[in-house]
Structure formats: C-alpha cells, structure tokens
Image: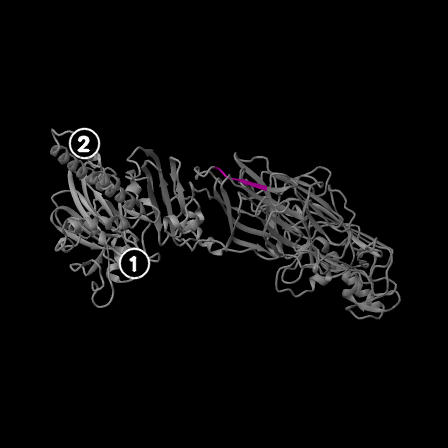
Amino acid sequence: MSALALLLLALGARGAAGGCGVAQFACRSGACVRLDAYCDGAAQCGDGSDEPPHCSPCNRTYYGRAGVAYALALRGARAPFLCHLTFTAGGGAHGELVQLAFDEFRVGRYAAGALDGCPDGFLQLAELGRPFTGGSWCGAADGAALYYSETATVTATVKLFGARAGEALALRLRYRFLARRDAVVRFGPPGAPLERGAVAPGTYCTRTYEECHRKACRLQSPNYPGMYPRNVSCYWSLRQKAVPTCKHAMISVRQPLAHKMQIKRSIAMASLNKTGRAVRAWRDCTGERDRLIFYDGASTDDPVLGEFCGGDWLPAVTSRGPDMLVAFHSSPYSAPPRAAAPLAPLRGFELDVAVVFADSDSLDYAREARRCEFHVKASSSEDEAAPRGRRGRLRAPQHTLPPDTTCSWTFHGRPGDLVWIYFSSFTHYPLAEPRRDAAAAACAVELRIWDGGGAGEAPLLGRYCDAAPALCARAALANATRAPRPCAPPDGYVSAAPLLALAATSRPGTATHPLAFSLHYEFVDARLEGAPLPIAESRVRAEPPECARRLTEPGAFASPRNALWFGRGGARRLRCVYRVQAPGARVELRLLAAAFGRAPRCSTRVDALTGRPECVPDADAADGAAADAPLALDAADDAPRAPHLRLWEAPWPGHRVPLGCICDNASAPLALAASGGALELELAAAALAAGEDHRHVHFRGEWQRAPGPPRCAARRRLAPPGQRLELRFPYGADAASECGEAPFLLRARGNRSVFLRVWGERLAAGDACATPNRVLVYEAGGARLLAAVCPGGARAVRLFSAEWGARAGGEAALLVVWAAREAGAARLAWMEVWRAGGDNATAGCAHACAALGACMAGALWCDGWADCPGGADEAGACGAGARLLAALGAPAAAGAAGAAGALLALALLLALALRRRRARRDARLLGALAGRRLTEELLCDASRASCASSVAS
C-alpha cells in the first residue's frame, strides 16, 4: 500500500474518531473542515492543525522532468514570514532552464514613489552563479506573469514584515523545467542562433556586441522572454570594428513589434484603450519607470539620443558613428507587471540591431560628434560628372539627433554660380504625446533658409515653424521612363549669390520626433559671355531678357549654361541672341559644337534657292505643316518649333540677313565669315523638353578679327531717292563690289516705299539657273526671303517693300545680298515711290511713274536713266535745260552733303565756261589789232565813263 493511501486511511480514521464525516478532517479543536483543505496552505483550522510542518512548501528544492508542469501555493501565512523556494533543473531529461508562471500574486503592498516601495513584504528572485540584484516584487497582481531563468537554479524568497487587514499572503505558481534547445525565442533556432553578446564578468546583464553586420544581434531584457528582475542595470555596448573601404558605419536599434517591446507600464497607461501606437519617452519617464537610454557613443558621457520607458514599439535609434551604448534600468520595487490582452503574459523586450553603412564622403552623417554641420562645395562647371560637384540630392541626417540640435547645410558655389534647391519631400511628426507645458513653447522643428551664409544680415528666403517648406513632390516620381514636370520656382529656392544656407532645429530630438526630407540642389552657372545687348540694337526679344549679349573680345564663347533657363529648370521657351562685333574689321567665326536635344526632330539641309543651310522639321514635329517646309524665320513666338541655331549677318542694329540655320547634332563644326563687322547667333527653342538642359541644347565656338574693306556698313547703306548698281565677282573688282556679301540696305523716307528692279529671272524651288550666283532680296523687318534672282538678261524682277501692297505701317526698306560663287555680274536699280492719294494714285504727283501708279522723286526725273519702268521719266521735254534743272534739283534731294558738292561742281563749271568765253574774245581782239601801234584808246575800257570821255575828246 502506498504512503498516500496510508495517509488517507489515517485521516479518515481521525475524522471518524472526532465525529467528522469521511470527507472531512477533524481539527484539534474538534471542528471539521473539508479534507481537500488539508495541507493547502490556507490554515482552515483555527489551531493550524490542518497545516502541519511537513505540509509547507517552503525551504525546499524542487526538481522535475523537462516539459512537465508542477504547481504549488502559499496562503494565509502570518507575519513575520520567510520562505525559500528553490527550483533546480537537473540537466538532460530534467532540463537546463526553469520557467515560473505566477498565476496569483498577493505579497504585502506596493507603495509607488516611496523610498521603500515594499514596506510590508516582498518576493525576490536569485539565480545561482549570478549577482544578486536586490530588487523586489510586492503588492497585488492578477493574470499570468512568466519568469525564465538564465541558469539551472533559481530561488524565490518570500518575506513578510507585517500585514494590514485584507492583505493576506496568496502566492500561486506553476513551475516547469525546459531543455535549452527548446528555448528558441531566447537563443534562436539551432541552425541560426541569435547573437546575444558576451557577458561582462561580475555583472548581471552587461554585454558587449561586435560585428553585428555578420550576425543577427539582439538586445534582450534580462531573463527574456519573461519578466525581468527588479533593480537591475544593464549596459550593452555595440561596436562595429570592420568597416569596408570608403564606408562609414552607424549602429541602429529598433523594434517595431509590440509583443517584443514590453516595458513595465503604469496602471493608467495599461488601462488605456488606444487606437494607435504609443511611445513614452523623456519626461514621461519618472522615477518609478523602467527605462532604456541610448548614448551616441561608447560611454555615458556621450550625448543621449533617446530615453524610452514604455510604449507599443521602439522607433529606430541610430548612432552617428560605429559605437553605441544602450543602458537599461529597472526600478527597485514593483508589482509583477501585466501586459494588456492579447499580449499576456508579459515577455520583456527584444531589440533588433543593424549596422548601417554610408559612403564615407556622403552627407548622410555629421563628421563631428557634437556639431551637425554640412558643407557642399561646387566643382568647375566644366566638370559635370563630379559627384556632388554641380548637382545632387541630400537627405536629413540618417542618424538620430539629440534634443535641441541644429543641423546646418551650406552650399558654396564658384564665382558666377547661383544655388538652386527644392524639396521633393519634407516630413516630421511626433511619436510621443506632446507635453502640456510645451504647447506654447517654441517650434518642435524649425527650418530656415538664407540667401547667403546664414550670418549677419543675410536675406531670409524662408522660415518654417512646424510646417513644410515649398515642396515639389512630383520630383519623387521621376525615374528612367517618367519625366514629371520640372521643379522650378516657386517650388524651390534660388540664391542671388554663390552662397546659400539652411538650418533645421529639432527641439525634442529625432528619436521621438523624426525629421526626414529629400533635398535636390544644383549649382547653376549663371555666367554670361560679353556684355548686355539692348533690345534697341537687336530688335529681338530675348527670353529671358538677360540672354541678349554683345561680344567684342575675340576668343572662345558658348551658349548659356543656366539650367533654370531650360526645360529642366521649368522654362518653356528659350531665345538667346549673341551679337559678335568687330568694328573696322571682318568677323571670322568657327562653330565648334552644337546640339539641339537628346533626339532632335529637325534636319539641316542646303536651301536650293540660297545655297545656305536651312532647318527642316521632321514630319511628326511639323505640327500639321508640310514635312519639307523650313522653319519660318519670322514665326510667332508660340509656334511649335524644334530647337535650332540661326546665323545672321547684322551690319546695322535692327537689320540683318540670314546666313543659315542648323538644327541637328551633326551640323558642327562650321566656319562662317561676315563681310561686314557683325554676326548674330540666335539659339531658339519654342517648346523645351522637360528633362533637357544646357547639356542637351547648346553651342560652342570661337571667333577672331580679320582685315577687310573699310566702312562697309556705311557704304552699303544707300541714301534715297534711288541709285543704280553694277555688281561684279570677284568682289574686289570695283569699289561697289569689294564689300562682298555684305547686304545693301535700301530705305525710303517718311511714308514712302522702296521699289527695286533686279535684272534676271526670279527662281522658285526646282528652277534651273546657268550660274550659282544669286541676288537675294529680304524684308528689312523680319528678314524673310522675298526673292532669289538668277542674275543676267534683259528682263527685270520688280519688288516693293512690304508695306506697299498692304497700305499699312511697316518698315519701308529692303535688304539685298549679292551672293556670287563664280565670275559674273549683276545689275539692279531702286528708288523710293509713294502714292499721292485718292482714286488716282498719280493725280497729284509732280513726277508720276504711270507704270507703277506711283510718284517718284524729281531728282530722278530726266537724269539720263530710265528709273520708271518704260522710261516715262526720260521721255518728252528732257533736253539739256531739263537735265540741268534735274541736276540742280539733285542736290536738294540728296541731302546737305550732296547739295554742297553739286553746287561746288556747278560753280566750277560756270567759272570755267566764263573764262573760256573771255579768252576767245581777247584772242579775236588781239588778232584785229595785229600790226597796229597801240594807242591810249586801245588801253581804255569802253565801259568806263572816264575812258568814254577821253575818246570823245
């Protein structure tokens, strides 16, 4: 028979002997209690006879088989009371670790905030071979709380010093022995163990972690995954020694999972019905709270990055360098904490460790421990490929910033640069609930941007208090196949000098108030060649206006490199005019390179009429126009046109003739020479592509002075009322032709018009001409080609200035170019004409040209040349007197200088004729008197009165 059976028989006999039932036990006092109350620790008998000494679980060592759960309880003990419960895992089938599950806990009382938090009694846990912490649990707690030992033996000690009414001892727990291989939550699976660090000798939980980039490092609370002891301090030193070349290491600790981030909470916090995740940090961490402290370095003297004492998760905390110290402190006294359902039972915390590698030359981290300063310096504008040299993107520091930290970024451009920045994202948000006393305080996050270095009186471009700056969020959508609309101002900021600075201040620190932004920056080369060119001289509206330049110093030159003027900078169109001037000489220019976009939709061809290059858009880029139609040189500004470069000869401000147009990327190199002293280059794009800039649309060249005929611009500006020209090639054959292809400017006065005749045949596309020589006639205003004439023959091509047919305003002028390629000649004549008014245009004319229905200048009437077609001006009364009168009229019509010359010539002619007449008279007189003796009468002048009287006498 077993001992238990004998005990039951004895108890039954005792009950029967005392008059109690079979299922009852008789106390010494004679009272009867239930049999199951025997040795239950509750002392149902008033004399304690139901709880003999052999029934107490105290001062015993408990063993068991691994995986089997056992239970015990302590109830009703009176103070003073001391009880030791030792649990030992015997190894092998008996396990290596101990699990304690507290199902009921009422030991003394917990006095929160008191110097002695457990004044009436407590429970303490100690493990064999580990330092004793001295922390205590006390008070009342419901629900399960788990404790897992780190060693094979753990002792629970219960002490009672006194008890108040209603504070009876009640401790009910289950214990179980576990095999180490089954503790995968703490140690990880056998094939992939977790790195828990090396324990520092003589400490309870201080550990050292190294090279966490190779293994899965975990910071676990003591006795994880159960509740951690009281009055414990752990220091976890994290260090990364192996850093790849050109890299910088930073340590990051985080835990996003709520069931792995359970720190003791207050009763008020545990009872909250939260809909979002909470974080308790900084001033919420009062004296009785357990806390985690993160240091930005290897010691407690380094800046504190964050202090956490509860919450549903741990946001990432990242050190600035390869060292971080994490400290954990638990309060000396506490009731066994309980996690809110469904996270029960409490498991402590486990933090994930990661090593973040950044480029050693990046701007993702501050170089100095206590100074958050960044400097971005521009490289030469010619070195576009240098990292961060001209443009790039930077982020907020990737490490955590301590509270009240100001980070500054200063952009240093080169002379002639501007700084352009814009934000594609900017976020900051509090993770911890803001304190009431901070509601009226300064901003949590403040951003300031200066046009300059941020010191002294530098203009402030913007200041933002807990608000985002101007954003260009669409920039974040850009990728290899998507090019969103450019981020031009006002989406960004542009400095007026080569220096720009911004500063971001975080009052609470970024551990509990993360700050993140993506900033795009660019050093814009705002240098321009030459000097400004007034619009009065070019009469071309540049866009932007600053892109009209005059070059007078020979040498290299290039188109603008200001990215803000192109599609990538938000500009929709571009029109730049460069006037190359060499007064008193000829301009020789060599275009070294030119590009017109990533994929130009335009071709450069030789014009069949002029023999000069022209721009012909592709069929899909003509926007409804014919595929072979050249780009209109005088098209409206809003007309869709591909990027192109026009070249002009411009002897006079506001008047120019085209030398050609190029629009594909294979047009350069190209050599040009001006017959006069000025050339103009006009880079135009009416619809800039969003992703293109000065790297895709540009030109580059060089120029020099060359000797040439003097005063060509003045000599080729012909004065009214008209003139006849005989032009020859080679150009130096006579004075009229020596200025080569420099244009003639034919300009009428007042409200008069220009009429031009060129002897030859007017050419159309495809027409044949016996010579490559051409006479080209252009409008003076828009430089539109009016006619290309094949010179020679008896027929003449007649042309009027543009306003003649329109009877409206406009410039009464034509430009004529003698473009010869072989020996030959050309003949032309022009004059100014006008209408008298009324139905009959010639009714009020003093000199009418009926063939044209116009009036003509009297200076051309009867001048010996048929200026009016048909010769009406030379018919009728055009004798010598009429020609003389015409000659006399010529000075008045030719201006003051011409008039003076004509009068002088006429005076000389008259004096010469008078002298010859007198000489002939004297010769006849001398002949009549030959042989005779001279007398006094012969010496008298008959016109004199004295002589007449002498003869009479």
Which is the main secondary structure of the residues drawn in magenta? strand
Nearer to us of marks 1 and 2 is 2
Q: How far across and how far down the image is residue 398, in percent?
A: 57, 46
Q: Is residue 377 magenta?
A: yes
> What amino acid does circle 1 point to?
Asn
Left or right: where does residue 124 sit relative to residue 874? right
Kindly identify which residue carries mark 1.
751
Name the one closer to the observer, 836 or 83. 836
The outermost residue toward the front is 953
Q: Quadrant of the C terminus?
A: top left
Q: Is residue 60 magenta?
A: no
Q: Quadrant of the N terminus?
A: bottom right
Helix, strand, or loop for circle 2? loop
Q: Residues within 10 Å of mark 2 (few under 14, many from 20)?
A: few
- Image quarter for residue 435? bottom right
Above or below, 307 against 928 in this view is below
**For the point 88% across and 63% down, which residue is it?**
47
Helix, strand, or loop for circle 1? loop
Q: How far across and how far down the image is residue 82, in percent?
A: 83, 53
Q: Colour scheme in the image?
A: one colour
**For the point 87% across and 68% down, which residue is it?**
30
Q: Is residue 666 visible?
A: no
Name the one closer to the observer, 211 or 667. 667
Left or right: where does residue 872 sit relative to residue 278? left
Q: Is residue 428 visible?
A: yes
> What amino acid does circle 2 point to?
Thr
Above or below, 179 against 636 in this view is above
* Residue at mark 1 to residue at mark 2: CA–CA distance: 71 Å
Kindly identify which residue carries mark 2.
935
Q: Which residues are magenta?
A: 374-379
Name the one closer to the observer, 683 or 218. 683
